[in-house]
Image (tube, grey):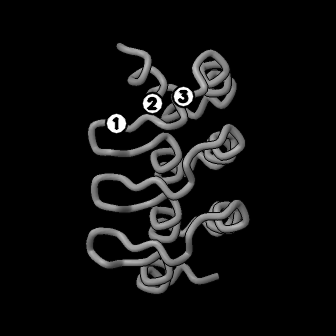
Amino acid sequence: MNEIELFFHTFQSGNKTNVEAQLKRNPELVKVKDARGFTPLIFSTYFDKEDIAKSLIEHNAPIDAKDASGNTALIGVCFKGNDNLANYLIDHGANLNTVNNSGTTPLIFASMYNKTH
């Protein structure tokens, strides 16, 4: 397993301490993408790893980076309905007006899935 694969595996397992240790060794890992174009931040928000997502943001993760479908972490959070993480992303500068490849915005996903709290 290479360094990037190990990094994605580490935060998928939810081990914040190990994630932070890997970022300390290589701060650039916060910007890598997997084969689907997911950044660590997008991946962690998609799998509700809130503490890891917050740590990634504290380590300067690109908050508005897009995956291969044009989704950002905020779009994914609005789809999934994690209000705390949505507010955290917004408070840290996530673009509310971003549009994915299908023309969908975070607000559209939030309203489609009744996640507007």
Q: Please name the residue shown 53% across and 64% down the image.
A: 74
Total labels: the figure holds 3
Residue beneath disc 2: 8
Q: Please name the residue shown 64% across and 82% down the image.
A: 117
The CA distance from mark 2 to mark 1 is: 8 Å
The CA distance from mark 3 to mark 2 is: 13 Å
**Marks 2,1: beta carbons within 8 A:** yes
Dot in front, 3 or 1: 3
Look at the picture and state if 107 lies above or below 70.
below
Picture coordinates of residue 93 (x, y %)?
Answer: 66, 64
User: Which of the marked residues, 3 or 2, is nearer the chain's N terminus?
Assistant: 2
- Which residue type does callout 3 highlight? Glu
Dot in front, 3 or 2: 3
Q: Secondary structure at mark 3?
A: helix
Residue beneath disc 1: 34
Q: Secondary structure at mark 1?
A: loop
Look at the picture and state if 94 lies above or below 113.
above
- Which residue type does callout 2 highlight? Phe
Around disc 1, counting alpha carbons within 10 Å, would you say few (fewer than 14), some (14 to 19), or many (20 or more)? some
Q: Please name the residue shown 48% across and 25% down the image.
A: 7
User: Which of the marked residues, 2 or 1, is nearer the chain's N terminus?
Assistant: 2
Q: Which mark is residue 28?
A: 3
